[in-house]
């Protein structure tokens, strides 16, 4: 009954005289809206006038709307052309036999050591996840290296080793969306497990891993059996032992799950060792990781960090401009990249790549945007933390400032477009809002959010923030209500 009533209200023509009146009438009448706590602010950017607000100064859990603020911070503080470097160092130059004592892959915060297409393209096919590592290994070989007598080290000490921010759930770390934060980022610090059925009933399902590195120990008892797909994946936090059990139907197309990597620096060292082997370079020592731990830093908000390890550079890779990664971060809502951007700002501005320094810099930035201190609290840069809070008013203050800044064109290019790309590609389809909403989505359990810009039919631009908390019904119904408000805004 409730859902039928809700659909009826979505279809009902609204007769109020202006968009604000129509939005108010819709909110007051909708049963879905009554089930949740809504915060909204809509501002006319040409007239600098608030058109509508509801609970705009109350704090809400923003989910991935936090990325709006992190990417705005990074774009403003670092600039669109900022780049990252990844290097491979040896303790000394190769000897007459082409041997070095050790090799160290040093992460500089590049989020895209992967097969991702850059610039961002919707629905682009995945490339080789180890292409960047293979390039670095080829450069090492070109310097005449033929053997490594000691260790291959993954060094992510450009950022403090704080892999999981406060407020992340314990099971977030298992999956790709909660991959450990590190200055070394191979394939978004994830591995994918693909299961396909065996060739007969009761046969074990086939398991493949991408990238094909022996990092996790995988124990599978998944069998081919009648019925529906029913698979469970278990990995304890900090463990490299992955257990799978359950069933796959005989003609099932297969199931792929992406897991987070618990120690990206160690994983990068494994990846480099394998790439060196493909270049004919023998490695005789072990694979290890070098981290910068919080207790090694004098002040986590201001640094400085210890001096980096010296060495002879044998390979270097420069990232794409920062703008390209911020576009990926917002378009597809990439948690790890947002966390890395926060630490990149911290390292550039405060000489220490820590979460604490990044949050301190974000607080200063929000103050510059006109947001009061009581209007926000952040524990991470991605919005995955359940400790993050912000008001719709603070979000709109940032949106208005960026719109009126010289970075407007670059900034708008980061945001998903309604009915066209990113996390909005399948929303607002076949409605007047297609191509007129430029906004960041947000979603957690009992949380839905959308903040950005609306281009009205008369050409005027609106900045808006819609934050919804504490709903218990289907998330699709809440998203439909948000999209309805977007359509009313552009009239």
Image (cartoon, grey):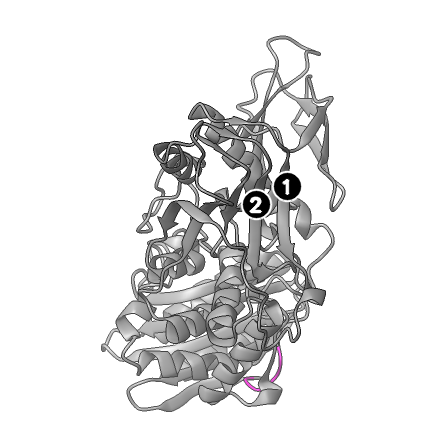
Residue 402 versus residue 58: which sits nearer the camera? Answer: 402
Q: Which residue is denoted by mark 1 in the rendering?
A: 288
Labels 1 & 2 near each other (Cβ < 8 A) = yes
Q: Position of residue 272 (x, y in %)?
A: 50, 36
Residue furthest to the right: 236
Magenta stretch prevailing secondary structure: loop
Image quadrant in which you'd find residue 223: top right
Magenta segment includes 58: yes
Binning the other alpha carbons within 10 Å of mark 1 as few (below 14), some (14 to 19) or many (20 upward) gives: some
Is 180 drawn above or below residue 229 in the view shown? below
Q: Which residue is denoted by mark 2 in the rendering?
A: 154
Residue 195 versus residue 164: which sits nearer the camera? Answer: 164
Residue 176 seen in the figure: no
Label 1, secondary structure: give it: strand
Q: Is residue 133 left or right of residue 362?
A: left
Residue 386 versus residue 157: which sits nearer the camera? Answer: 157
Q: Position of residue 313 (x, y in %)?
A: 42, 47
């Amino acid at each position: 009954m409730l859902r039928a009533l809700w659909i009826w209200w979505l279809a009902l023509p609204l007769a109020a005289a202006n968009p604000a009146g129509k939005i108010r009438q819709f909110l007051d009448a909708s049963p879905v809206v009554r089930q949740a706590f809504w915060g909204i602010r809509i501002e006319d950017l040409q007239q600098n006038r608030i058109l509508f607000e509801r609970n705009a100064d109350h704090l809400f859990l923003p989910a991935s709307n936090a990325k709006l603020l992190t990417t705005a911070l990074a774009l403003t503080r670092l600039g669109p052309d900022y780049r990252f470097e990844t290097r491979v160092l040896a303790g000394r130059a190769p000897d007459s036999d082409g041997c070095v004592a050790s090799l160290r892959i040093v992460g500089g915060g590049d989020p895209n050591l992967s097969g991702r297409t850059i610039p961002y393209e919707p629905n682009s096919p995945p490339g080789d996840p180890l292409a960047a590592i293979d390039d670095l290994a080829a450069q090492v070989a070109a310097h005449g290296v033929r053997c490594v007598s000691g260790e291959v080290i993954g060094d992510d000490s450009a950022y403090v080793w704080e892999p999981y921010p406060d407020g992340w759930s314990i099971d977030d770390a298992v999956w790709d969306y909660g991959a450990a934060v590190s200055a070394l980022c191979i394939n978004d610090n994830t591995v994918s497990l693909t299961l396909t059925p065996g060739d007969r009933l009761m046969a074990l399902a086939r398991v493949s891993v991408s990238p094909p590195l022996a990092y996790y120990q995988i124990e599978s008892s998944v069998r081919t059996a009648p019925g529906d797909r029913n698979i469970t994946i278990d990995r304890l936090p900090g463990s490299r032992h992955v257990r799978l059990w359950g069933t796959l139907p005989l003609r099932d197309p297969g199931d792929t799950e992406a897991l987070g990597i618990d120690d990206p620096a160690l994983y990068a060292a494994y990846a480099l060792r394998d790439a060196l082997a493909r270049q004919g370079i023998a490695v005789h020592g072990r694979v290890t990781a070098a981290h910068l731990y919080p207790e090694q830093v004098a002040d986590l908000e201001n640094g400085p960090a210890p001096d980096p390890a010296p060495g002879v550079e044998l390979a270097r890779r420069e990232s794409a401009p920062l703008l390209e990664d911020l576009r990926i971060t917002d378009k597809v809502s990439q948690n790890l990249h947002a966390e890395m951007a926060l630490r990149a700002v911290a390292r550039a501005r405060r000489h220490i790549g820590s979460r604490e320094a990044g949050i301190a810099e974000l607080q200063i930035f929000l103050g510059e945007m006109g947001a009061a201190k009581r209007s926000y609290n952040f524990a991470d840069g991605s919005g995955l933390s359940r400790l993050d809070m912000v008001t719709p008013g603070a979000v709109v203050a940032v949106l208005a400032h960026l719109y009126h800044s010289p970075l407007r064109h670059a900034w708008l290019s980061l945001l998903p477009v309604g009915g066209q790309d990113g996390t909005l590609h399948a929303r607002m389809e076949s409605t007047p809002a297609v191509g007129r909403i430029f906004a960041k989505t947000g979603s957690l359990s009992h949380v839905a959010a959308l903040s950005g810009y609306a281009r009205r039919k008369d050409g005027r631009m609106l900045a808006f923030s819609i934050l919804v908390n504490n709903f218990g019904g289907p998330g699709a119904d809440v998203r439909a209500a948000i999209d309805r408000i977007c359509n009313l805004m552009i009239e």
